[in-house]
Amino acid sequence: MDTLKDSIFTWDYFVDFKKSMSNADSIKTELKILQSLIGDNEDTIETNYLNILKRNPSVRKVLPILIALRPDKIKDMPIIDNVDSLVSANKKNLFDPKIAIDSKMEEDLVNFFNMSGLKEFFVKSKVNSLIDYVRGIEVGMDTNARKNRTGKAMENILEKYISNFCKEHGLRYIIQATKKKIYDEWHIDIELDKIDRRFDFAVLNRENKMFFIEVNYYSGGGSKLKATAGEYKSLFDFLALQNVTFIWITDGLGWHSARTALHETFLHNDYLFNLQMVAEGVLAEILL
């Protein structure tokens, strides 16, 4: 427990630039059309804005990203666009290019343009490139995905280690191994406890002994830790009946809140390690 790590974050954890740039570039055409509104006159910009949307319906779908909002969030987020009535309504149709613009939608689109601050943004904007602006938004919004990348960060660390280890010692391995992938790659048919069971790694050593490896990281506590520990005890037994070795690599200070559950699994399973133990070469003793 003393060697549990307080962090597994590498610099590439913070921003997925490839994803952010790709998201922005995928709407480059629409953003170039809207670019003409930058620096427009306050008296004419609403008319020009509506004309753009009527001539280029696809532009409507990119309006939400200008206020750092994903389209899939809009459908579940009723909006109050009248502060007098305080009545909220779903406005997802405003950004659907397939729905024709009628007089009521014109009014709602102009209302969105004003209340969101976009009108003032375009009139007074010091932004020269709308594409660069959206790239910045995408980078900012990508930080919200960091929580989802925590588990992936652990996988990435171990993937690099396992990849190098297997290449060095002539072992075969599969990432995100399923029953089908294992059969397709190695012609080994195994039984799994769940139809959708997927292992982070499967390794086949030179004696054709198979190992399944699951990795995870818990920075905080919760019921998930106890449930995982219990599940992996049962999984160890299930796989052992098929002569498959299950290795669990886990880390994070969250285990201090579930040390009993972790200790029970440690006593039951043959192979439960943290990153420190992996770094010290424990996998070589098992896989080779």
Image (spheres, rainbow, N blue to C red):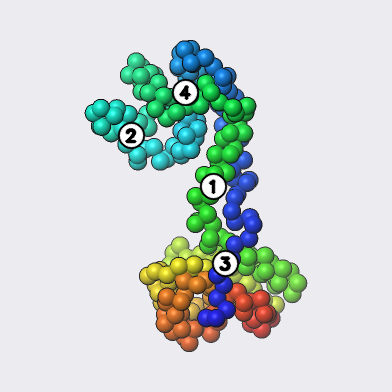
Residue 68's tag is: none
Kind of residue sitting beneath label 2: Ile
Between disc 4 and disc 2, whose residue precedes? 2
Question: What residue does disc 4 label?
Answer: 119
Q: Name the kind of residue labelled 3 in the image.
A: Ser
* Circle 4: element type: helix
* Disc 1/disc 3 C-alpha distance (Å): 20 Å
Label 3 CA crowd tier, 10 Å (few <14, some 14–19, many 20+): some
Which residue shows up at 67% across the image and 65% down it?
A: 160
Q: Nearer the viewer, residue 246 or 50?
A: 50
Residue to which mark 3 is pinned? 7
Q: Answer whether labels 4 and 2 touch (C-beta < 8 Å).
A: no
Q: Is residue 99 above or below residue 168?
A: above
x, y percent for residue 179: 52, 65
Query: Mark 1 and 3 residues: CB-CB less than 8 Å, in contact?
Result: no
Question: Residue tagged by mark 1?
Answer: 142
Residue at image location 59% in from the left, 50% down from the top: 15
1 vs 4, front mark: 4
